[in-house]
Amino acid sequence: MGALSPAHWAVIAIVLFVLFGARRLPDMARGVGQSLRILRSEVRELEAEAAADQPRPDPSGVPDPQRAG
């Protein structure tokens, strides 16, 4: 059960062409591409927010007197 061969991809393409027609396939591909770009940007934003929320250790090793409570 390895990767799909070119013959498998051809059958999949033909089935998609028959089901959705020549006009709708480019629109669907464009929509999927836009969705992936939005998903990637949202994931990057979440990662940036998570990194900003993490406390950064002081490289000097000296505790900050203002933080000490």
Image (cartoon, rainbow, N blue to C red):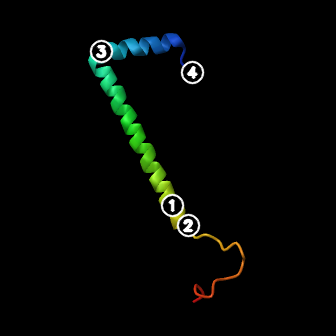
Instruction: Identify the disc placed on residue 54.
Output: 2
Q: Position of residue 15 (x, y in %)?
A: 36, 14
Q: Amino acid at mark 4?
A: Ala
Whether the residues at callouts 3 and 2 have beta carbons within 8 Å, the answer is: no
Q: Quadrant of the N terminus?
A: top right
Q: Secondary structure at mark 4?
A: loop
Residue 3 place in picture, x, y as percent: 57, 21
Label 3 secondary element: helix
Q: Distance of mark 1 from mark 2, alpha carbons?
A: 6 Å
Callout 1 secondary element: helix
Q: Report, in whole angstroms, how far the alpha carbon at label 3 lies from the one at label 1.
A: 43 Å
Task: Kindly identify which numbered label has been placed on residue 22.
Answer: 3
Q: Tell me the kind of residue under disc 2.
A: Gln
Residue beneath label 1, please?
50
Of the image marks 4 and 3, the number of the one nearer the N terminus: 4
Could you give the CA–CA distance between mark 1 and mark 4, rounded to whole angstroms? 36 Å
Point 60% across, 87% down: residue: 68
Image quadrant of residue 34?
Answer: top left
Tag 2 or tag 4, which sits nearer the N-term?
Answer: 4
Foreground label between 4 and 2: 2
Q: Of the residues shown, which amino acid type is indicated by label 1?
A: Ala
Q: Amino acid at mark 3?
A: Ala
Gap in angstroms between the C-alphas marked 3 and 2: 49 Å
Position of residue 43 measured from the top left corner of the image (x, y, whole percent) = 46, 49
